[in-house]
Amino acid sequence: MKEEQPVVFILSDSLGETAELVVRAALSQFNSQGAKIRRVPFVTEAAQVEEVLQEAAGTNCVLAYTFVLPELRRALAAGAARLGLKAVDIMGPILGALEGIMPGAPQLKPGLVHRLDEEYFDRMEAIEFAVRFDNGKDPRGLFRADVVLIGVSRTSKTPLSLYLAHQKVRSANLPLVLGVAPPEELFQLPPEKIIGLTISPAKLVEIRQERLRTMGLEGNADYASTGRIEKEVAYAEEIMARLRCQVLDVTNMAVEEIATKIMQLLKKGDNL
């Protein structure tokens, strides 16, 4: 008579992926044909636990479960004992151990790990967006951005875009260059979606001269001349006035400070 194929029932109040990874890692240590895995996700009531117990009764099986809710763990443990089934609590022991060293009590909310994963992927998507649409590379990205940063060169547009990306804000940035008309797409955006970055010409002279020195170039180049910079700043502020966008003076401000103000402006405008 052929031996009945073993079955591992995996029960979870979330997706059950954690338990399945553990089960598969354990099964890999056996040289048999393996066991059938039956995953039962999103178990939220004791009645659902009982249904699986009845299905498992009399079979060659093990029940593995990752319930964060104590009442579900108790229901499964009691039911398995009643029916003579083998059951393994994967989540309960580690939760109990961590309670002894962690501040506060566990939240006991199913699916938190996946919410953290979603946050991670949202952050990575925002970073990729910032890199793709940095420095006006593709004006089409302006329509998809949560915020568009504009300003003359060396007003921290790129560092700000990346900083905001870590806050899951999709940011595109666009340089305003003297004598070069901005892309038409910029003027099609709602003003509240654009934030202009301006700076005092004297401070910008210092920044650009230092930039030239670090590159091994002469500090008196036209790029860092007072006259040129005054014209650039005036031109940029003229564009910002036409756009009727919000303007931040970033003179003597750190990237973190500017980003905080941008986040406040976005929340005020309900863009986040």
Image (cartoon, rainbow, N blue to C red):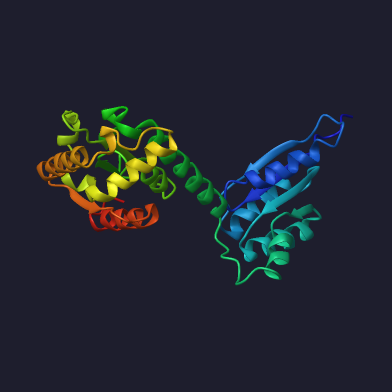
Q: Residue at x 62, y 60 (%)?
A: 68
Residue 185 rendering spot, x and y as whole percentages = 19, 31
In the rendered image, the vertical position of residue 44 relative to residue 38, given as above or below: below
Residue 41 rendering spot, x and y as whole percentages = 59, 47
In the rendered image, the vertical position of residue 133 relative to residue 150, given as above or below: above
Residue 145 rendering spot, x and y as whole percentages = 30, 39
Q: How many marks?
A: 0
Nearer to me, 10 or 146: 146
In the rendered image, the vertical position of residue 103 relative to residue 185, given as above or below: below
Nearer to me, 245 or 98: 245
Is residue 134 shown to the viewer in this render? yes
Nearer to me, 8 or 266: 266
Q: Name the image quarter holding the N terminus.
A: top right
Left of 16 or right of it: where is 185?
left
The quadrant in which residue 78 appears is bottom right
Residue 40 rendering spot, x and y as whole percentages = 62, 45
Is residue 156 shown to the viewer in this render? no
Q: Residue at x 20, y 37 (%)?
A: 228
Instruction: Please identify the residue farthest to the right as the structure is shown.
Output: 1
In the rendered image, the vertical position of residue 75 relative to residue 90, given as above or below: below
Q: Residue at x 79, y 46 (%)?
A: 58
Left of 268 or right of it: where is 23?
right
Instruction: Please identify the residue farthest to the left as the structure is shown.
Output: 242
Left of 174 or right of it: where is 65?
right
The quadrant in which residue 101 appears is bottom right
Nearer to me, 5 or 115: 115
